[in-house]
């Protein structure tokens, strides 16, 4: 029969063994990668807004939308890969981090992007395109703000998770 002191010591050793220790196998790198991608997406959406504002005609708008969509797809693909990796992490007791809200945010951002491309493609004039761009920027800023808040929460607990390797 185990003593209480022995059980506590065993639990402490077990938890210490499951923690990330130096962080190389913890979730910190994954959360850091999400932070970088969110910052790069925000920078890209600001540059996109400026490019649309400077566009002289709908052909220039369409070209910018194609370029912008490709850049964002690259970031969201990498973010989804990072989130999938984070789903393999656990807190030493078999509990994965709650990445569901971030996955949902990624899905919402993807839907907004596809809707935006379709609406921009169907714009009949520059006024309609500019109006849609303003609405898109507000939607993107709102989603990015929410995702950055989620990412900050993940960073606070990242050291308590152990993962199979780490994402860059």
Image (tube, grey):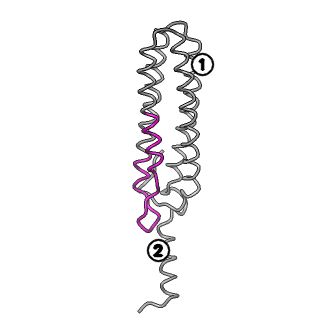
Up-down relation of residue 162 to residue 118 (above or below):
below
| Residue 76 position within the rendered picture, expressed as x and y whole percent measured from the top left | 44, 36
Up-down relation of residue 108 to residue 65 (above or below):
below
Q: Which residue is mark 2?
A: 14
| Residue 67 position within the rendered picture, expressed as x and y whole percent measured from the top left | 46, 20
- Between disc 1 and disc 2, the foreground one is 1
Is label 1 in a helix, a strand or a loop?
helix
Q: Are marks 1 and 2 in contact (CB under 8 Å)?
A: no
Quarter of the image for residue 78 reads top left
**Is residue 2 left or right of 42 when viewed as pictured?**
left
Q: Residue at x 50, y 76 (%)?
A: 13
Q: Residue at x 41, y 43 (%)?
A: 81
| Residue 38 position within the rendered picture, expressed as x and y whole percent measured from the top left | 54, 38
Magenta stretch in the rendered image: 83-110
Up-down relation of residue 105 to residue 54 (above or below):
below
Q: Residue at x 59, y 49 (%)?
A: 152
Tag 2 or tag 1, which sits nearer the N-term? Answer: 2
Quadrant holding the N terminus: bottom left
Query: Residue 94: within the magenta?
Result: yes
Is label 2 in a helix, a strand or a loop?
helix
Q: CA distance from mark 1 to mark 2?
A: 53 Å
Q: Which residue is mark 1?
A: 50
| Residue 39 position within the rendered picture, expressed as x and y whole percent measured from the top left | 58, 36
């Amino acid at each position: 029969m185990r003593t209480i002191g022995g059980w506590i010591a065993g639990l402490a050793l077990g938890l210490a063994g499951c923690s990330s220790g130096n962080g190389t196998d913890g979730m910190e790198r994954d959360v850091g990668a999400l932070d970088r991608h969110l910052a790069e997406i925000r920078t890209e959406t600001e540059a996109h807004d400026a490019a649309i504002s400077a566009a002289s005609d709908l052909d220039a708008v369409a070209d910018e939308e194609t370029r912008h969509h490709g850049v964002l797809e690259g970031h969201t693909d990498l973010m989804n890969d990072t989130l999938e990796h984070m789903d393999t992490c656990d807190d030493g007791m078999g509990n994965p981090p709650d990445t569901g809200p971030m996955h949902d945010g990624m899905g919402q951002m993807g839907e907004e992007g596809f809707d935006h491309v379709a609406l921009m493609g169907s714009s009949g004039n520059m006024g309609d395109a500019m109006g849609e761009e303003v609405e898109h920027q507000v939607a993107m800023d709102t989603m990015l703000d929410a995702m950055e808040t989620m990412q900050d929460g993940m960073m606070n607990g990242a050291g308590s998770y152990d993962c199979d390797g780490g994402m860059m």
